[in-house]
Amino acid sequence: MSRLFGEIVEPSTRALIDDDIEEYPDYLGFTPEWEGNATVPKQINSLIVLESNVIKDVVNNCVLAQEKSICKLENGGIEIFQLPNSNYIILYNERKGLNPGQIVEILEKWIVTSKTIYTVTTDSIYNYQSTNNYKEKPVSLVRVISNVDKKRNNLEQPNLVTGLGATILEYCIHESIKKCTLYIIYMDKSPLDSFSCTPIFNVFTEIGIPINNRNIKARESSNNLYM
Amino acid sequence: MAPMFRFSKSSDLSGYALIIPCVSVGNVPQLTVDLLVKTYNLQKIASVWHPAIVSTVGSDPYDVNSSEICTACELYANDELKIACIQLRSTLDCNLAKKFFEDIYSNMKELNVKKIIILSSAFDYDLHNINNERFYFLDSTQVNSPASIPNVKELQMNENGKYLINGAGFSINLYSVISRSLKCLLLGKFISEGDNRPDAEALLEKLLRVLDLQEYSRKIVCPSSWAYVFGGPPPNGIY
């Protein structure tokens, strides 16, 4: 803040705009940088897209362990793992490079080939908006949006989901591919342990991800400040 | 790449006025489109897909009992009033923004709409006198120009020969692409951030005058999703 002392600080806005850009850069196209065998399998029963740091920790600890990915999209931040019964997991780490819309266009054949698509992401419970007068705000909540069975949709207004999973669901809605279900797990930001991971394990069980162990190592808090 | 517009029923938008809200300060253009859709009962007729649009999914913002899914960008229309509007609920990836402008321009040409109205908003600290002329416009046709509407002023270029409006996002860029060969109007309001619902109502009123639809003026209905403008109620446990 001291750098701003005495200077005019223009107000910021909650709108997602970037006024510094007078001239947008030219679109140069993109080339997928695959590593490994990225051939789309002939049969995919379930394509499971997992994102967020919390999910990644749980998956690496309890599902994949030492499993090696079959292929990696370097500039898209995705790794694809094969599970038994022609099920596949896509792990997504957001990074600079391709945006989710471009990644979905690269993964189009995977999406079309799959019989079912599940996407799982997490968000902080404090970002969850509801008119319910909770006596105590729940520690975690699981919400579903699906274009397979609309009766299951229980994410209330005005909560919105973003990320690769949301982009895949949006693409499926646009292309009338009725097979995508998105799970969003609203969680407390406490360190991961076997208790806080229960909703994640429940969702994994529901969508058929085999859990090899439930003994997750508690991750230390990144700092000791009360934020 | 998937087609940008996927219509849920066969629609002919020739002769329609099409409204596009830009992501701008206070999200006033989006709020205005929300009011337009809800008050004038516009129906969703197409989903819009483009890799530049940051995807969002959620429940129907206009009907709390609906199980429909809303996405980041959708097209609504009212056949009786001959108006259509794109509701853009998210932002654009700046690296693909130019491609988005070109793609939407070519799609607009194919749709054969009568006129395109781009809505925007800008920081009112740019104004020297905040009491009047809180609305601005740019018109590619100069026919039925909104200059005759009270408090609406045409934007002027700066000394470098450019239009500069702080807080208006990509509205000038989109206007300059679309106005190459299509009839296009940029309409906006200078605002401060805060409770921007009155700004949206005021912009809607000017929009109706521009569209010459004052005779259809009716009591404004806010969508149910606006109940959360200031967040949900506090948990009972804090009392």
Image: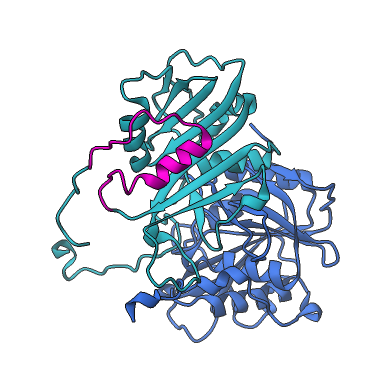
Chain colours: A cyan, B blue
Query: Does residue A182 appear to the left or right of B106 in the view shown?
Result: left
Foreground pick, A115 / B195 = A115
Q: Quadrant of residue B41?
A: bottom right
In the rendered image, the quadrant that contains the C terminus of chain B is bottom left
Residue A196 on the magenta segment: yes
Q: Is residue B96 visible?
A: no
The boundaries of the magenta stretch are A190-218
In the rendered image, the quadrant that contains the N terminus of chain B is top right
Which residue is situated farthest in the bottom direction here?
Answer: B131
Q: Main secondary structure of the magenta part?
A: loop
Whole-percent x, y for residue B163 in the image:
50, 60
Q: Is residue A52 visible?
A: yes
Please say if B238 is above or below A72.
Answer: below
Please say if A82 is above or below A170.
Answer: above
Query: Does residue B10 appear to the left or right of A133 in the view shown?
Result: right
Whole-percent x, y for residue A128 in the image:
44, 61
Whole-percent x, y for residue B11 in the image:
83, 50
Residue A49 on the magenta segment: no
Q: Residue at x 56, y 63 (%)?
A: A157
Q: Residue at x 28, y 45 (%)?
A: A192
Foreground pick, A211 / B189 = A211
Whole-percent x, y for residue B174 in the image:
58, 52
Please say if A92 is above or below B189.
Answer: above
Please say if A27 is above or below B185.
Answer: above
Q: Residue at x 56, y 71 (%)?
A: B226
Q: Quadrant of residue A96?
A: top left
Foreground pick, B215 / B7 = B7
Query: Does residue A139 appear to the left or right of A99 in the view shown?
Result: left
